[in-house]
């Protein structure tokens, strides 16, 4: 009987289910989408029940589509958007909508955390990370201060993928890579930080049990199995936060190879053998989904999200064309942008549409087009968006270079990596080869590989990646363009300090005049 592995990725726009065989061949995938709610400016929420419904629909659709015998499925792995807070009562019922990773409401609570811990230095010593608005801990404090009735009902706090795990297995469990992004985790020791929980007056029993990513955390409940058409008792492994699982699925499990992700958010991700990161906390340092290893990453909040915003706001013609031709509207947008000279003749885009994490950690930052002239038409703006995202990602790369991280190859992944133009821009801006791999299924693929490790299909995470992940394309940097971008990147870096105080004033203005019209 063939051994088949199921990976599930609970993303921001939808949940994806994926089946692979033991050689890593993708047998099929299915995705079901759900809405994102923004009841106030800078807020971002979802219904956990939507994740669960989408998970069930995706699995059932996938089994029907592939014709795979459910008896062949030997393990299930989970990945998902990080940092989101799912508040459950003592009966496991949802108390309110989940507050997501890109929600910016908790700036006050972040300051409070730093004060309670005794300063940024102490916080970095305890967690290896700064207090950022997207993280889980400040969301818990926000609930306590702003929705005390809801807070009084809380019995468990889960991350998005771990809520799906709870529904699959009945277990309150998480794993080290996702838990690292809560600000309640001792990343060095790979366990919950009793000191952080005590300092913030958060009960430790609210936290789920912690596992390593390939470890089995529970098995599929009989009632759920019947509903899904699967055998009861299939092992469910820890899995990983979306970026750690993506790294596994991309073969980033050893030193020297990094990935750049062009999903909704943008990520530069590097493997670490020891838990040492940026001393100022500008990079995230988390546990890797590889047991006993860590990773560092820089995150920008609007990478592919910036391009999607542009498409949705100004790409009506391209969207209409896609209906007639079957081509992706992004193809039409990048086709014309490819004829624009490198540097967009001085048009610079700051991609801070939902605030920014690395390197600025500024929830008040906003998007900016600088240097607009009469020559700049739509294709110029498109290329400027692609270049601005590349510059934002290079900010993280520069911090990693300062740590002495080896960078012989950077693998481009996620939706934006499908664009040859964007990959070449990245190669030129980074002045480093950009490669793509044979697998384009994202974090769900990594989750499936982790399931394979957990149930003994592979000897280790490294073994799984060596067997199934292969490089298929390579973009080399053009030195003439790299020189131009080096100079333009310097100008890009000058813009944020100039705008920082303006962002703060604009935030106050928006709060004053629009907070009651949300």
Image (cartoon, grey):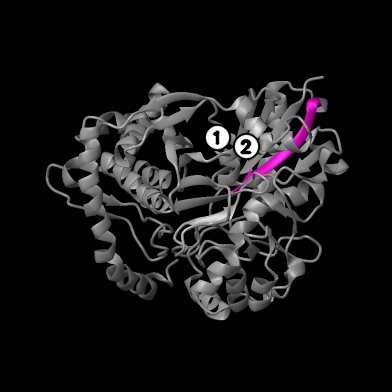
Q: Which residues are magenta?
A: 72-80
Which numbered circle lies on residue 282? none
Badge number at residue 250: 1
Residue found at x 69% / y 22%? 66
Residue 82 x, y percent position in the rendering:
58, 53
Give residue 504's quadrant in the image.
Answer: bottom left
Whether residue 419 is in magenta: the answer is: no
Give the answer, above or below, for where 393 lies relative to 340.
below
Residue at 79% from the left image edge and 23% from the top image edge: 69
Residue 371 location in percent, x, y? Answer: 17, 52
Q: Quadrant of the C terminus?
A: bottom left
Query: Which disc, if any, is residue 446?
Result: 2
SS at mark 2?
A: helix
Question: Can residue 380 be seen from the camera position used here?
Answer: no
Secondary structure predominantly adopted by residues drawn in magenta: strand
Q: Is residue 40 above or below residue 477?
A: below
Q: Quadrant of residue 381?
A: top left
Q: Relative to residue 163, is residue 377 drawn left or right?
A: left
Q: Is residue 73 magenta?
A: yes
Check whether the beta carbons of the residues at disc 1 and disc 2 lie within 8 A of each other: yes
Tell me if residue 402 comes above or below residue 76 in the rendering. below
**Disc 1, SS:** loop
């Amino acid at each position: 009987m063939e051994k088949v592995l199921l990976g599930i990725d609970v993303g921001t726009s939808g949940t994806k289910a994926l089946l692979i065989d033991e050689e890593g061949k993708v047998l099929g995938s299915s995705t079901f989408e759900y809405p994102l709610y923004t009841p106030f400016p800078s807020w971002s929420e979802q219904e956990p029940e939507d994740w669960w419904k989408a998970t069930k629909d995706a699995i059932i659709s996938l089994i029907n589509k592939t014709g795979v015998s459910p008896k062949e499925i030997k393990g299930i792995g989970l990945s998902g958007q990080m940092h989101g807070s799912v508040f459950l009562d003592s009966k496991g019922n949802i108390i309110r909508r989940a507050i997501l990773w890109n929600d910016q409401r908790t700036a006050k609570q972040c300051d409070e955390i730093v004060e309670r811990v005794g300063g940024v230095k102490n916080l970095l010593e305890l967690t290896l990370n700064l207090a950022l608005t997207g993280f889980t801990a400040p969301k818990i404090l926000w609930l306590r201060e702003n929705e005390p009735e809801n807070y009084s009902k809380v019995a468990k706090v889960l991350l998005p993928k771990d809520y799906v795990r709870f529904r699959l297995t009945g277990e309150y469990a998480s794993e080290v890579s996702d838990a690292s992004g809560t600000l309640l985790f001792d990343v060095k020791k790979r366990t919950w930080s009793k000191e952080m929980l005590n300092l913030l007056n958060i009960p430790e029993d609210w936290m789920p049990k912690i596992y390593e990513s390939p470890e089995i955390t529970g098995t599929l409940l009989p009632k759920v199995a019947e509903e899904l058409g699967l055998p009861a008792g299939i092992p469910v492994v820890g899995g990983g936060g979306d970026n750690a699982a993506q790294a596994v699925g991309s073969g980033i499990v050893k030193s020297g190879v990094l990935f750049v992700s062009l999903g909704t958010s943008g990520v530069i991700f590097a493997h670490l053998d020891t838990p040492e990161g940026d001393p100022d906390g500008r990079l995230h340092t988390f546990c890797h989904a590889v047991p006993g290893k860590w990773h560092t990453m820089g995150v920008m909040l609007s990478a592919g999200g910036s391009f999607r915003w542009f498409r949705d706001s100004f790409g009506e013609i391209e969207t209409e064309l896609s209906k007639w031709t079957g081509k992706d509207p992004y193809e039409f947008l990048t086709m014309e942008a490819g004829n624009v000279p490198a540097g967009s003749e001085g048009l610079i885009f700051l991609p801070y549409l939902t605030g920014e994490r690395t390197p600025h950690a500024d929830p008040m930052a906003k998007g900016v087009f600088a240097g607009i002239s009469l020559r700049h038409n739509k294709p110029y703006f498109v290329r400027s968006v692609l270049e601005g995202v590349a510059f934002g990602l290079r900010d993280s790369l520069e911090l990693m270079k300062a740590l002495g991280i080896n960078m012989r190859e950077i693998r481009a992944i996620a939706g934006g990596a499908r664009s040859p133009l964007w990959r070449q821009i990245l190669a030129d801006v980074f002045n480093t080869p950009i490669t793509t791999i044979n697998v384009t299924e994202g974090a769900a693929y990594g989750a499936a590989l982790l399931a394979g490790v957990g149930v003994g299909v592979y000897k280790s995470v490294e073994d799984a990646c060596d067997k199934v992940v292969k490089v298929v394309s390579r973009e080399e940097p053009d030195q003439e363009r790299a020189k131009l971008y080096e100079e333009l990147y310097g100008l890009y870096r000058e813009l944020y300090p100039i705008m920082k105080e303006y962002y703060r004033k604009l935030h106050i203005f928006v709060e004053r005049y629009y907070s009651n019209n949300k």
